Image: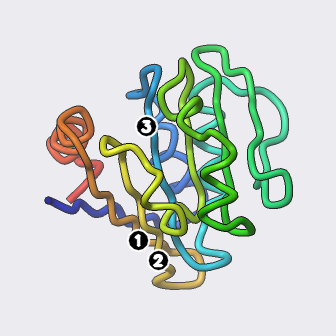
Amino acid sequence: MSAFTFIAQSEQDTERFAKHLADLTVPGTVMTLDGDLGAGKTRFSQGFARGIGVQGVVNSPTFTIIKEYEGSQLPFYHMDVYRISLEEADELGLDEYFYGEGVTLVEWSSLIEELLPPQRLEIKIERIGESERQFVVIPHGDPYTQWCSNAKENGWLT
């Protein structure tokens, strides 16, 4: 399995990268985000949501677990599974989101890895400076491998 990298020098770079990935989405797209507190998961999610045409405020669904937004292109399902157990996550029926007509983004996804679909785009965010972040992008499945190959050819990923 190949891993690709994107370095963001600022929050604006993070948002641009997220918007670039949003341009590639189709119904059933699943992206996962992991990183320490303050790594940039919510900033990425906000840029991603804007990229698929979500209007208004997008914030982390820390206490609601799942927030649903209507984008101009696709519905956006934003999940934060930090505060729930694997069993609780299983009871939520996440498959309906993962295999639905929208785009799903899961923060803290490593906590429910057993429930994630086999085809997804995994993103790990690491702080490498005050405002710099390293995004390690791991494609799972052919569509996401193609996304990453194209992004590398276009200079988005190394």
Asked which secondary structure carries label 1, the reply is strand
Q: Which residue is mark 1?
A: 134
In this rendering, the answer to whether 74 lies above or below 47 is: above
**Which residue lies at the image location 45% right of the left edge and 39% below the top edge?**
30
Q: How is the image coloured?
A: rainbow
Marks 2 and 1 close (CB-CB < 8 Å): yes
Report the front residue among 142 and 128. Answer: 142
- Density class for disc 2 (Cα within 10 Å; few <14, some 14-19, many ≥20) is some
Identified by mark 1, the residue type is Gln
Image quarter for residue 138?
Answer: bottom left
In this rendering, the answer to whether 67 lies above or below 44 is: above
- Density class for disc 1 (Cα within 10 Å; few <14, some 14-19, many ≥20) is many
Q: Which residue is mark 3?
A: 20
Q: Is residue 109 left or right of residue 71?
A: left
In this rendering, the answer to whether 100 lies above or below 29 is: above
Q: CA distance from mark 1 to mark 3?
A: 16 Å
Q: Position of residue 49 (x, y in %)?
A: 64, 36
**Earlier along the polypeptide chain: callout 3 or callout 2?**
3
Report the front residue among 11 and 23. Answer: 23
Q: CA distance from mark 2 to mark 1?
A: 5 Å
Asked which secondary structure carries label 2, the reply is strand
Residue found at the far top of this picture: 72
- Density class for disc 3 (Cα within 10 Å; few <14, some 14-19, many ≥20) is some
Asked which secondary structure carries label 3, the reply is helix
Q: Which residue is mark 2?
A: 126
Report the front residue among 26 and 115. Answer: 115
Image quarter for residue 148?
Answer: top left
